Image (spheres, rainbow, N blue to C red):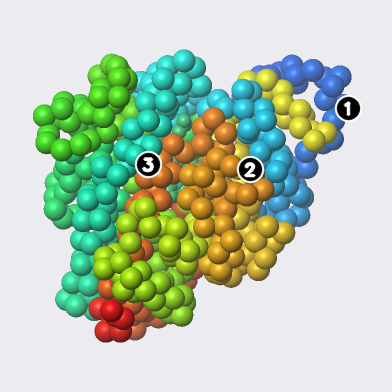
Amino acid sequence: MNQLHKLQEYLPASALERKNMLPVVSIASAASIFFASYRFFSSDQESKTKYKKIPMPGSNYPYVGHIWSLGELPGRTIQKWHGELGPLINLKMGVKNWVLVDDPILAQKIFVSNGVKTSFRSRNVFTFDHYSMGGMGLAFAQPDDRWKFSRSAALTVLAPKHIEKYMPTIRKEARDVTNRFLESTEKQGFCDPVEEFKLYALNVIFKTVAGRSFTSNEDPDYKKLKRIMEYNIKNSAWENDLSNFLPILSVYEYFFGTLAEQKAFIRDERDPFFKRVVEDSDIIEGPNVLKSLAEAGFDLSFNEKLVLASDIILAAADTVSVSMAWNICALMHHPDIQNKVSTEIDEFVKLNGQLPGLNDKGSMPYTMSVMKEGLRFKATTPLGLAHTTREDVYVDGYMIPKHSAIISSMDSMHLRADIYPEPEKYIPERFLNNTKPMQTAANGKVEDRDHFNFGWGRRICPGISMAEAQLFIALVEIFSTCHILPTSEGLPDTDDAVNGGLTAPPAPFKAKFVKRTDIRT
Ligand code: HEM
C-alpha cells in the first residue's frame, strides 16, 4: 500500500470538505500553502496577469488540492481532464504546482525550446538524497556539470555501435523467454507474460551493465535485484513522497515511517548489491557497460558508477518489460496482426537464410510498426518522469510559474485523435510511413516523431536504441516461432492496468504460446 492509500484510508474525501477539517490541520496546512504560495506568487505578479490562465480541473479539495482526485490510475484521470480543458492543465498538488501538457507541439516548446529552464528534477528526499547519493547518476540528478558528464558517458556506451556488442545477449535472452513461454504453456496450459518479461528485461540489462545474468526467476540474486528495482520504481513515484506535497505530514512521519525505511533500504539492500556489481564488472569476462565507461575515457568515481549502473538497470528493466507485456496483451486480440508479423519474418528468412537482426529493421516495416503501435497504444510511463522549472516559463501566451513540475501526459498525448486517428484501436499500419529507428524519430522534428514515450529534450531517454533492440528482437524471436492464444479464461482486458509507480503495467494475465506449424521456409 502506498502512502496515498494509507492516508486516504484515514482521511476519506468526505473528511476533506472545508467544514469538516480539524482546525489544527487547517492552520498547519494553511501555513504550508502560504509558504508555497509565496514561492509561486513571488513570480512576477504583474506579468502573470498578462498571461492566459492555465485551466484547472474542478475537483480541487482544500489543502490537498487535486491529490485526492487523481484516482488509482492518474494518467487516465488526467486524460479525461485534458479532454475537458485542453492541452495544458494546472493541478494543485498540496503545496506543489503541476502543469501537464498533452499537445506535442506545445510540449516541444516547453521541454525543448525552453530546455535550459525546464530540465530540472524535483528534489525529493528518497530519489535525490538517498537513491542518487545527493545528485549522482542521471535520472534524479539536477542538470549540472556532473550530470552532463554522466549523461555523455551513458549516451556513449549506449550508442548503437556499442549495442552491437550486446546483440548475442539480447538474442539469447529473447530465445530463452520464448522457450520459457512454450514450456510453461506445455506444462501448465498457460504462461504469465508480465512476470516472464521481467526476467527477460532484467537479464538483458544486467548482463549488459554488469556482465552477468540469471538462470531462472528462482535465482536468489534475481529475486533481490527484482525487489530492488520494484522498490525503487514504487518509491520514486509521487504517491510515496507525500510529505513533499503536504509538508504537514512530515510531522507525522511516524505515521508512515517511510523516510527511515527508504534510507535503510538503499543502505542495506541497494548499495551492497550494486557495490558488488561495480567491483565484479572489471573482472567478469566479456563486454559490459561499466567496463566500456573506462575504455571510452569516462573516469567516474566508484559511487558515480554505482548510481549510474543502478539508474540504467532501473530505467531499462521495468520499462522494457511493461512495454512488451502490453504489446502481447494487445496482440492477443489480433491474430491477423500476429500472422502478418510472422509472414514478414518468414519472408525475410526465405531471402536471407537467417532471422532479421538489428541492422535489418529497414526490411521489417510491419514488425517495426507493431513495436511502435504497442508503445503508443499503452504508454509505458503514463506521466513520464516529471521535469521542474526554476524560472517562470513563457509559452504560447501562458506563464508556467517557477518551481512547477512539468509533466508530459503520455496516456493522453498518445490517444489524441488529431495525431492518431481512431486512437483507441490497435492499428500498426498507422506507422508504416514512419518506420525509422525510434532513436532517430525521437530526436528529429516533433512533427515527425512516432510517439513520445521516451520523453523530451535534454532529459530524453538515453536508452532508446537499447530499448528498440530488446523490443524488436523479442518480437522477431516470438513470432518466428509462436502464435499467442487466449486461455480458457478468455482474452486479457486491455483496459486493466495496475499502478506500478512510475510505470503502469497490465494487470497480470495468462496466455498460451503455441508452436507455429505454418512456418513458410
Ligand atoms: C520502452 C522502454 C523505455 C521507455 C518507455 C523509457 C522512457 C523514459 C522516459 C519517459 C524517461 C524520462 C525522460 C524525460 O525526463 O523527459 C527516461 C529516462 C531515462 N531512461 Fe529510459 N525508457 C526506456 C528504456 C530505457 C533503457 C533500455 C535504458 C538504458 C539502457 C534507459 C535509461 C534511461 C535513463 C538513464 C534515463 C534518465 C535520463 C536523465 O534523466 O537524464 N531507458 N526513459
User: Disc 1 and disc 2: Cα gap in Å?
Assistant: 31 Å
Q: Mark 2 or 3 closer to N-term?
A: 3
Q: Which of 457 and 409 is in front in this view?
A: 457
Query: Of the numbered discs in the image, which one, if any, rests on residue 160?
Result: 3
Q: In which quarter of the view is residue 480 placed?
A: bottom left
Q: In which quarter of the view is residue 477 placed?
A: bottom left
Question: Tag 3, which secondary structure?
Answer: helix
Residue shown at 44% from the left, 44% from the top: 464
Q: Which of 291 and 260 is in front in this view?
A: 291
Left or right of 321: which side holds 240?
right
Extreme residue toward the front, this view = 351
Three-letter amino acid code at the position of disc 2? Lys
Say which residue label 1 marks. Answer: 50
Q: How crowded is mark 3: few (under 14 residues within 10 Å), some or many (20 or more)?
A: some
Say which residue label 2 marks. Answer: 445
Residue shown at 14% from the left, 46% from the top: 220
Can you say which quadrant of the picture contains the C terminus?
Answer: bottom left
Q: Mark 3 or 1 closer to N-term?
A: 1
Three-letter amino acid code at the position of disc 1? Lys
